[in-house]
Amino acid sequence: MTFLAWKSEYSVGIDSVDHEHREMIELVNALYDEMKNRRDRGSIEQFLGDIHATISAHFALEERVMKQAAYDQYEPHKDDHEELLDQIRELMDVYADDPDNGLPLLQERLSDWFANHFSSFDSRLHGKLDIPHH
Ligand SMILES: [Fe+2]
Ligand SMILES: [Fe+2]
């Protein structure tokens, strides 16, 4: 079973943005599979670092556009991005400490974030501003 399934309510109505969001979900799904199948610890740690970097780049772009446009919801939107990045960093620490604790933490925290952020913060943002994709 796939860990995070794409749902129509995640769509912000712009193909290029939805595509990037789907890619983020795919990365988290691949991480889930790797942890579940107890893949090599070093490669999972590396993968966690890559996911953090990819997601940070996506957020940085949105934040830059929001800031330039003096977007009214900049602060809460950025706070919600920080929340996920903190969770990924925490997952990295917890995993490094004891890999057995990685999967439960991933299951417990991350799925809610994706469900909420795309369908609330991001749909509002993309309805108002044009974010170039990378
Ligand atoms: Fe986004
Ligand atoms: Fe966002």
Image (cartoon, rainbow, N blue to C red):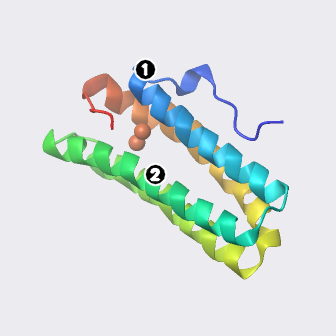
Left or right of residue 109: residue 21: left
Q: Is residue 40 above or below residue 111?
A: below
Q: Nearer the viewer, residue 69 or 102?
A: 102
User: Quadrant where the C terminus lies?
Assistant: top left
User: Quadrant where the N terminus lies?
Assistant: top right
Mark 1 or mark 2: whose residue is earlier in sequence? 1
Q: Secondary structure at mark 1?
A: helix
In the image, residue 103 lies at what x, y percent? 77, 60
> At x 69% / y 53%, what residue is drawn?
31
Q: Quadrant of residue 51?
A: bottom right
Q: Quadrant of residue 79?
A: bottom left
Q: Secondary structure at mark 2?
A: helix
In the rendered structure, which amino acid carries the disc numbered 1? Asp
In the rendered structure, which amino acid carries the disc numbered 2? Thr
> At x 61% / y 45%, what residue is drawn?
27
Residue occupying the far bottom of the picture: 97
Identify the disc placed on residue 15: 1
In the image, residue 116 lies at what x, y percent? 55, 39
> At x 70% / y 57%, what residue is drawn?
106
Q: Is residue 18 above or below residue 88?
A: above
In the image, residue 126 lies at what x, y percent? 34, 28
What is the spatial separation of the Cα atoms under label 1 and label 2, in whole angstroms?
18 Å
Residue at the spot of label 2: 54
